Image (cartoon, grey):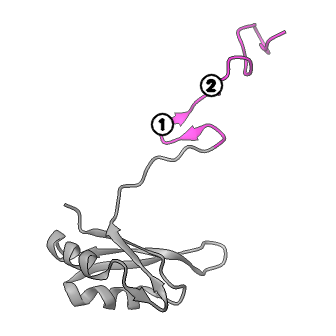
């Protein structure tokens, strides 16, 4: 079992240090990070906490899930691995893939190709 915890629906006033101190009541916190918007520098309203062991992580999840913080009920659960995203331009972790439609693209006709 993982010891990385997802914390969602956070008030925008929560910082890394306040997040860490809230989870430190349940055991040793390896890291606590509130995700910030790249452009504005403000909180995105969620973060991740990494606990020393899976047992203390589960205790923190059980105790803090649904708890009210500044009037917001926070969501606390085990963090899931990141899913591979697909961009609209065809690039992904596996490299570039051509469009799935057969009526567009380079076709099969010589230099310049295309369909007539």
Residue 99 vertical position relative to residue 93 in the rendered view, above or below: above
Residue 94 vertical position relative to residue 8 in the rendered view, above or below: above
Q: Residue 26 appears at what percent x and percent y?
A: 21, 85
Q: Secondary structure at mark 2?
A: loop
Tag 1 near tag 2, CB within 8 Å: no
Image quadrant containing the N terminus: bottom left
Q: Residue at (48%, 92%) from the top-left corner?
A: 70
Can the viewer see residue 35? no
Magenta region includes residue 41: no
Q: Secondary structure at mark 1?
A: loop
Q: CA distance from mark 1 to mark 2?
A: 15 Å
Query: Along the line of sight, which residue is nearer the eye, 44 or 41?
Result: 44
Give left or right: position of 86 versus 8: right
Please name the residue that numbered disc 2 is placed on.
100
Asked which quadrant contains residue 42, the reply is: bottom right
Q: Residue at (21%, 72%) from the top-left corner?
A: 58
Principal SS element in the magenta part? loop
Q: Residue 115 appears at what percent x and percent y?
A: 80, 11
Q: Callout 1: 10 Å neighbours few (<14), some, many (20+)?
A: few
Q: Residue 20 appears at what percent x and percent y?
A: 34, 86
Magenta region includes residue 89: yes
- Camera-near label (1 vs 2) is 2
Please name the residue that numbered disc 1 is placed on.
94
Query: Along the line of sight, which residue is nearer the eye, 62 or 24?
Result: 62
Q: Residue at (77%, 11%) from the top-left corner?
A: 111
Residue 100 vertical position relative to residue 47 in the rendered view, above or below: above
Asked which quadrant contains residue 50, the reply is: bottom left
Q: Residue 65 appears at what percent x and percent y?
A: 33, 77
Q: Which residues are magenta?
A: 88-116
Residue 86 vertical position relative to residue 25 in the rendered view, above or below: above
């Amino acid at each position: 079992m993982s010891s990385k915890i997802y914390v969602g629906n956070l008030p925008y006033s929560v910082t890394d240090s306040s997040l860490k101190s809230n989870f430190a009541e349940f055991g040793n916190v390896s890291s606590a990070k509130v995700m910030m918007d790249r452009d504005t520098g403000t909180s995105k309203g969620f973060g991740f906490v990494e606990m020393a062991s899976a047992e203390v992580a589960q205790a923190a999840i059980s105790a803090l899930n649904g708890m009210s913080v500044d009037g917001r009920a926070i969501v606390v659960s085990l963090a899931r691995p990141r899913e591979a995203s697909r961009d609209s331009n065809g690039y992904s972790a596996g490299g570039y893939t051509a469009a799935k439609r057969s009526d567009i693209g380079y076709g099969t006709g010589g230099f310049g190709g295309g369909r007539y």
